[in-house]
Amino acid sequence: MAEFDLVVRGGQVVTAADRMMCDIGIRAGRITALAEGLGQGAREIDARGRLVLPGGIDSHVHLDQYQGEDVTMADGFETGSRSAAAGGNTTLIPFALQQRGQSLRQTVEAYHAKATGQSYVDYGFHLIITDPTPHVLGQELPALIADGYTSVKIFMTYDDLVLRDREILEVLSVTRSHGALVMIHAEGYDQIKFLTDKLEQAGHTAPYFHAASRPQVVEREATHRALAHAELTEAAVMIVHVSGAEAMEQIDWARRRGIRVFAETCPQYLVLTADHLKGLNMDETGGKYVCSPPPRDEAAQAALWRGIAAGVFDVISSDHSPFRYNDTQGKLHPKGRTSFRWVPNGIPGVAARLPILFSEGVGKGRISLERFVALTASNHAKLYGMYPKKGTIAVGSDADLTLWDPERRVTLTQDLMFHGCDYTPYEGLEVTGWPVTTILRGKVVFDAGQPLGRKGGGTFLSRGASVSA
Ligand code: DUC
Ligand code: ZN
Ligand code: ZN
């Protein structure tokens, strides 16, 4: 009888700490041996010439998230997780969005119903809190944190989502007491409304003006305010989707004051600019790039790379927020196509995240391989309470692996994304380095350009406390 269920043989194994040439022995979904010359596996995968990385963890994706009556997300758990696996990921943390008036427990149950039996990869849920009533904060949230939902997202903008400062402070004081991490969407509601109204009055309604409706100062001010709230409450916060130097400087400042802040950026802020939204007509393709915060300019990209190299950023996530373009429920919106105001905010990117960051980061000498692993897997596992089960290659960890061809040159195209969207904002981008095989708990879920796993092979992860909290 074979000693292992699976042996991944002869690859270069990379973690956030080091790299080594060795085989990986897997039994019952977990890594049981790391050594040269391991005994036979019932199945063997030849990894010579490949990097063997911890499966990617994308801690910021939106799947089947309620958007109101007029808009539908392009990915549910099946297609979103399939796209994730195609891009070398084995764990996702999407959001369970509380609608105002809804109980948080019912919210979570509703999102479990959407996900159960559908996912190709493992998943947890962050809780988006939009209605922080005394019952939600006093009863439901503490109980859900204890049940393994150890992270929350709150918004400082959007009519249906925004929390007032007092509400933010109340949420932070509960998460501080119960040990959860709070992701903050830091853009100021009133400033965006003011600028949007002025732009529309001037006839500036095309998607291009989305970027002008939320310049960096809007993000900077909200980031500063969020960090002041974190200081007051001593809560740990994650400023998500940081798009440029101005918010980054606030984070740096806060760290020097001892505020417990973590930071995330995303590939769109590293390879896209506001010019991608150009076109002065609602029908031009700028809507494909509408996301919030918007992509900025080359100076912002350069600043983010400096921040990545200097350790300002803990994680890089996709913020996969998929809407079809040519669809009445999508970006070419039914509301008369009157203004960028109505274009759904978000772009798909869960399959493209790792190739873009590898190519632009490791390939161009901006980050080491180990740092790539930290930014795309290990730090997500640590900050969101899954380490070392997830996010590393070690004896006892889940056998979540991505076999990576560091030399393969690929032009990103829609047919490589395996998502439910009808476009990729990265169409035509050339990358070097590609995930060739994705393994979830010892089972191959994506190989040679095709999904292989059983839909529903991915299971829910109850998470522990963040290392930060
Ligand atoms: N914020 C996100 O995190 N994702 C999509 C849209 C948004 O505003
Ligand atoms: Zn956000
Ligand atoms: Zn998001």
Image (tube, rainbow, N blue to C red):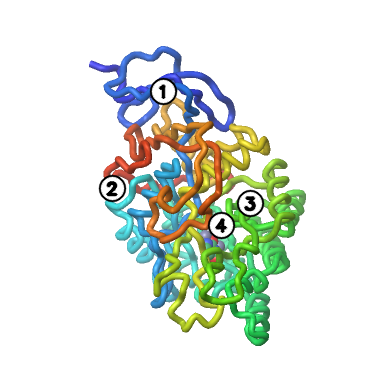
Picture residue at 69% right of the left edge, 68% below the top: 215
- Mark sitting earlier along the chain (1/4): 1
Disc 3 from disc 1: Cα separation: 34 Å
Q: Nearer the viewer, mark 1 or mark 4?
A: 1
Closer to the N terminus: mark 1 or mark 2?
1
Location of residue 367 in the rendering, given as x and y in whole percent from the top left corner: 65, 37
Give the label, 3 or 4, closer to the camera: 3
Q: Which residue is mark 2?
A: 455
Give the secondary structure at mark 1: strand
Local SS, label 4? strand
Where residue 441 appears, as percent x and y from the top left, is 35, 35
Location of mark 1 (residue): 24
Q: Quadrant of residue 43?
A: top left
Q: Nearer the viewer's eye, disc 2 or disc 3?
A: 3
The disc label shown at residue 270, or none = 3
Residue type for callout 4: Val
Residue 100: where, in percent of width, then height? 45, 75
Q: Work out whether 390 lies above or below 289.
A: above
Residue at the image position 36 percent from the left and 40 percent from the top: 446
Front disc: 3 or 1: 3
Residue picked out by circle 4 = 182
